[in-house]
Amino acid sequence: MIHLTDKPLTDPIAVIGIQIRTNNASELSGQGQIGALWGRLFAENLPAQIPNRASESIFAVYSNYASDENGDYDYLLGCPVSTIENIPAGMTYAAIPTGDYAVFTSETGPVVEVVQAAWKHIWAVAATDLGPQTRLPHRLRSLRSPRRRPSQFPDRDSPQP
């Protein structure tokens, strides 16, 4: 069973890691890249190479959706950081802006089954089931937010220093 709660994010979160561009059709066909990205993360001990880590957590950030569940999206796998200074070569960052978010909590179980079931549930949720300010992953078209405070993290589309 999937549980839905609302969570306000009062401070932006920056995540540094490795990123791919993919889509659900590729991922479900057996030709996906996400599994290999997770393998690379651990095989190369990439979390240890990320500077300014804010915690030991690993985040998977889905962003920059081209359209809906059928379109391409960016998938970044990495760690939350206190600053985006000194991003290692071959890595990038994503900024998660402040706002109200829908949080979906799944049951535990085999990762592939649990994640696929959670995403099927997420795609089926109607906007009317959520508050007017709540964001769903597929409805977040960019990392810019009109409600965002002056940011400590530049927009992803801006040139990096």
Image: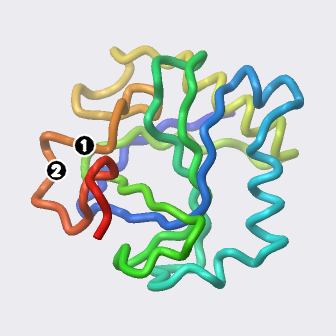
Q: Do the residues labelled 2 and 1 touch (CB within 8 Å)?
A: yes
Task: Identify whether 76 is placed above or below 1.
Answer: below
The residue type indicated by label 1 comes to Arg
Q: Which residue is found at the position 76% from the left and 26% from the top?
A: 26
Displayed quadrant of residue 88: bottom right
Percent x, y of residue 81:
43, 75
Query: In terms of secondary structure, where does tag 1 sit?
Result: loop
Percent x, y of residue 157:
31, 47
Observer-nearest residue: 28 or 74? Answer: 74
Cα–Cα span, label 2 and label 1 = 8 Å
Left or right relative to 100: residue 64: right
Displayed quadrant of residue 54: bottom left
Q: Which residue is found at the position 84% from the left and 71% from the top?
A: 43
Percent x, y of residue 128:
33, 15
Q: Which of marks 2 and 1 is in front?
A: 1
Q: Which residue is found at the position 54% from the left and 33% from the top?
A: 73
Q: Which residue is found at the position 79% from the left and 35% from the top?
A: 32
Percent x, y of residue 29:
85, 23
Q: How crowded is mark 2: few (under 14 residues within 10 Å), some or many (20 or more)?
A: few
Residue corresponding to mark 2:
148
Displayed quadrant of residue 50: bottom right
Say the numbered circle drawn on residue 113: none
Instruction: Tell me the quadrant of the picture where the C terminus can be found.
Output: bottom left
Instruction: Tell me the quadrant of the picture where the N terminus can be found.
Output: top right
Residue corresponding to mark 1:
144
The residue type indicated by label 2 comes to Arg
Color encoding of the figure:
rainbow
Q: Residues within 10 Å of mark 1 (few under 14, many from 20)?
A: some
Task: Identify whether 1 is placed above or below 83.
Answer: above
